[in-house]
């Protein structure tokens, strides 16, 4: 006899009807082979008595399973598990499965070791270093929620709930064109804009359209690691050039162009990632002229244009592009909060059309209501007001962070005070290693993170990008003290 009483569980507080609870449990028992084909089930009356439920509930359960084809009823004999069901796996119903979740696939698939697994688990008492992220506590959630509610309550909102354009919401594209033309000197229309789910999608789409195996893409000898991974995944040849205090050394790109066909150059021109330096005006013009002469693309990732403390923002390369060589990528995620996946890819109309077609097969479309919300958020001036507010906050945090670095840790680090952005490029004294710092810091509830991704070219510069914007004053002081304790212990061990 099958142990129905101990195996079948009923939750009377569940919203799911009891007959369906039982039916689903029977399906699991049959699919796992605990009730094999041809097994006769106990009568509805007997099962009702065992489970202390109404007989009609069991009858409804059996009828549901008959309709789904799991059971078959034989007149004058009873109800049986369908004899036509294949036996998937026979298990002893007395055996116990410690972990019912599938941990390994039952088929072969291709793994990619280039993509790191990102640990998002966070402990409350630990400080985690980042490479420059915004403080989500400053997110204008009330303003965004108010706009979203107003849009969602309109009678005609249903028009935006169906499948729509793979380019993104038309109103947002028009708003972005107007906003970026005014604020960043671009000369675009909505037809030059593809709305993406953040800048990474724009980078991925660009690489898919630009790069075939062994095509050459030029990046800095220090570079944004996610960009590297994206291009390597396309089997590109990556050529690295020097980055100095004026950004990419464009003369080296020119020498490469004389010898080989360059497909694209990737740059974070405003604040080079990770070192935070700005590409000089002379090199910007030189790079644009080279792109026009040698017909390569410039992927300009302008990830933190809005954050400048000592001067007005420098206009992007895209604002001077008259030949359609620049693919300009940015997002609102960095400015407002990472959870709002609103980004943009800006390029020539023909490139945007191809990108939209490709996007449609990996992500059919964006969130139309969220895109409408951010269109209103920008047009109302709420975005500009938010930027003005957080620039003041982040500048104060930058000043405090750099002041404490200089006062408490000057024997360990060299750095330049960044003119913008949300991070400092910290060069550790070469007596010490980031590996040792990471190991010791963990003992003091300080997580350093993956320092190796800042030296992709193995330059041994011993530097790391450390963000300051996401920590308030108390957290900055605590971070510096934990770092000081860590380094003092390492110093003693070296002496």
Image (tube, rainbow, N blue to C red):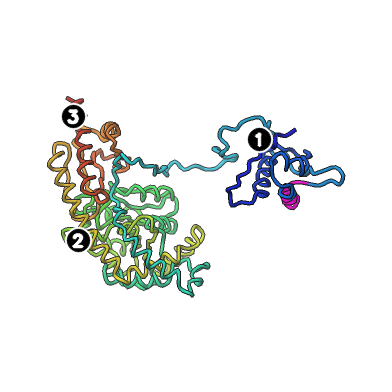
Element class at badge 2 = helix
Q: Which residue is mark 1?
A: 6
- Crowding near the residue tagged with mark 2, few <14, some 14–19, many ≥20 C-alpha atoms within 10 Å: few
Cα separation, mark 1 vs mark 3, equals: 63 Å
- For the residue pair 299 and 417, the one nearer the viewer reads as 417
Toward the left, the furthest residue is 407
As for residue 485 lying within the magenta part, the answer is no
Q: Is disc 1 in contact with disc 2, using a CB cutoff of under 8 Å?
A: no
In this rendering, does residue 310 appear at all? yes
Earlier residue among tags 1 and 3: 1
**Prevailing secondary structure class for the magenta stretch in the rendered image:** helix
Residue 491: mark? 3
Q: Which residue is mark 2?
A: 282
Among the two numbered marks 1 and 2 on one chain, the one whose residue lies closer to the N terminus: 1
Considering every residue shown, the one lying at the far right of the view is 76
- Name the spot of residue 146 as percent of width and height, x first: 37, 66
Quarter of the picture containing the N terminus is top right
Q: Is residue 152 above or below residue 56?
A: below
At x 28% / y 37%, what residue is drawn? Answer: 446
Secondary structure under tag 1 reads: helix
Q: Which secondary structure lies at badge 3? A: helix
Q: In the image, what residue occupies the spot 26% across and 62% down? A: 387
Residue 383 lies, in percent from the top left, at: 30, 65
Residue 459, percent from left and from top: 26, 40
Q: Residue at x 40, y 58 (%)?
A: 341
User: Is 441 situated left or right of 21 in this image?
Assistant: left
């Amino acid at each position: 006899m099958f142990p129905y009483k101990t195996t079948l569980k009923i939750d009377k507080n569940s919203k799911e009807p009891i007959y369906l609870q039982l039916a689903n449990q029977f399906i699991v028992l049959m699919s796992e082979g605990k009730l094999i084909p041809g097994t006769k089930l106990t009568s509805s009356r007997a099962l009702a008595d065992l489970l202390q439920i109404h007989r009609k509930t069991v009858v409804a359960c059996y009828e549901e399973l008959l309709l789904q084809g799991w059971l078959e009823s034989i007149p004058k004999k009873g109800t049986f598990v369908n004899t036509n069901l294949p036996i998937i796996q026979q298990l002893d119903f007395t055996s116990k499965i410690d972990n019912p979740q599938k941990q390994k696939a039952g088929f072969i698939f291709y793994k990619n070791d280039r993509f790191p697994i990102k640990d998002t688990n966070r402990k409350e008492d630990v400080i985690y270093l980042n490479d420059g992220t915004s403080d989500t506590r400053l997110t204008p959630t009330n303003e965004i929620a108010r706009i979203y509610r107003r849009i969602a309550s309109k009678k005609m909102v249903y028009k935006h709930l169906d499948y729509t354009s793979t380019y993104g919401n038309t109103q947002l594209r028009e708003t972005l064109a107007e906003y970026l033309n005014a604020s960043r000197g671009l000369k675009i229309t909505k037809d030059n804009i593809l709305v993406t789910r953040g800048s990474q999608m724009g980078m991925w789409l660009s690489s898919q359209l630009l790069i075939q195996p062994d095509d050459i893409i030029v990046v800095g000898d220090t570079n944004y690691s996610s960009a590297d991974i994206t291009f390597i995944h396309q089997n590109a040849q990556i050529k690295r050039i020097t980055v100095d205090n004026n950004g990419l050394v464009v003369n080296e790109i020119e020498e490469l162009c004389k010898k080989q066909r360059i497909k694209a150059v990737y740059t974070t021109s405003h604040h080079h990632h990770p070192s935070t330096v700005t590409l000089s005006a002379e090199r910007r013009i030189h790079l644009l002229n080279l792109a026009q002469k040698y017909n390569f693309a410039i992927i300009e990732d302008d990830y933190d244009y809005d954050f400048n403390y000592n001067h007005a923002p420098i206009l992007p390369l895209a604002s001077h592009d008259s030949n359609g060589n620049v693919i300009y990528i940015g997002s609102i995620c960095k400015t407002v909060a990472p959870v709002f996946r609103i980004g943009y890819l800006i390029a020539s109309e023909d490139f945007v059309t191809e990108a939209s077609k490709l996007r449609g097969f990996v992500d059919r479309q964006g969130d139309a209501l969220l895109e409408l919300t951010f269109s209103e958020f920008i047009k109302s001036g709420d975005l500009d007001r938010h930027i003005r507010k957080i620039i003041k906050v982040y500048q104060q945090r930058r000043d405090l962070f750099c002041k404490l670095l200089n006062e408490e840790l000057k024997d360990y680090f060299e750095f330049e005070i960044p003119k913008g952005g949300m991070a400092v490029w910290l060069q550790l004294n070469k007596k010490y290693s980031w590996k040792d710092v990471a190991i010791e810091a963990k003992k003091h509830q300080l997580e350093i993170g993956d320092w190796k991704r800042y030296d992709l070219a193995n330059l041994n510069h011993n530097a790391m990008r450390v963000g300051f914007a996401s920590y308030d004053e108390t957290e900055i002081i605590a971070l510096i003290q934990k770092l000081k304790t860590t380094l003092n212990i390492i110093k003693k061990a070296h002496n």
